[in-house]
Image (spheres, rainbow, N blue to C red):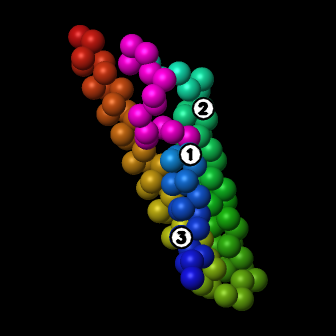
Amino acid sequence: MPIPGVNGVQAGVQAVAQSGYLEADASRTNGVAGTGGAAFAGVLGAVDGAQALQAESKTLALKAVTGDLTDIHQATLASSRAAVTLELVAAVRNKGVEAFNEIMRMQA
């Protein structure tokens, strides 16, 4: 049985994995990937997913505060999903920045 709170995180991980951003590309020549920007677009898709989860979390939190939410667990799960997805996107971003810095050090 899948845990509903993890589905948003799984979607973010799948978007990054499907983009090929983390995998070695067989069509590399001279160290440059020939993806045509597809990997970068996949990462942006993960960012869009994180933003959607944040919006859902804010909406449910507002409903909880105003008393319109009947099940507080929905708001808690949405908040946790948004937080974990944001951490995932930040970790991928940090790895990208580290890789860029390492490449710049190699060129110097």
Q: What residue is at 38 percent from the left and 18 percent from the top? A: 31
Mark yes or no: residue 85 visible: yes
Q: Nearer the viewer, residue 52 or 64?
A: 52
Callout 3 crowding tier (Cα within 10 Å): few <14, some 14–19, many ≥20: some
Q: Which residue is mark 1?
A: 18
Q: Main secondary structure of the magenta part?
A: loop
Which quadrant would the N terminus be assigned to in this image? bottom right
Q: Which residue is mark 3?
A: 6
Q: Does 2 sit left or right of 95 as displayed?
A: right
Q: What residue is at 64 percent from the left and 73 percent from the top? A: 61
Disc 1 to disc 2, how far (Cα)? 10 Å
| SS assignment at label 2 | helix
Could you say where residue 8 lies in the image, as x and y percent from the top left?
59, 63
Q: Quadrant of residue 65?
A: bottom right
Q: Give the residues in magenta.
A: 19-31
Q: Nearer the viewer, residue 41 or 32?
A: 32
Q: Nearer the viewer, mark 2 or mark 3?
A: 2
Q: What residue is at 43 percent from the left and 40 percent from the top? A: 22
Whichever of callouts 1 and 3 sits on the residue coming sooner in the sequence is: 3
Residue at the limit of the structure toward the bottom, as seen here = 70
* Residue 55 against residue 69 in the figure, above or below: above
Q: Which residue is mark 2?
A: 38
Q: Nearer the viewer, mark 1 or mark 3?
A: 1
Which quadrant would the C terminus be assigned to in this image? top left
Mark yes or no: residue 51 visible: no
Callout 1 crowding tier (Cα within 10 Å): few <14, some 14–19, many ≥20: some
Q: Quadrant of residue 56?
A: bottom right
Whichever of callouts 1 and 2 sits on the residue coming sooner in the sequence is: 1
* Residue 73 against residue 58 in the figure, above or below: below
Disc 1 to disc 3, how far (Cα)? 18 Å
Q: Amino acid at mark 3?
A: Val
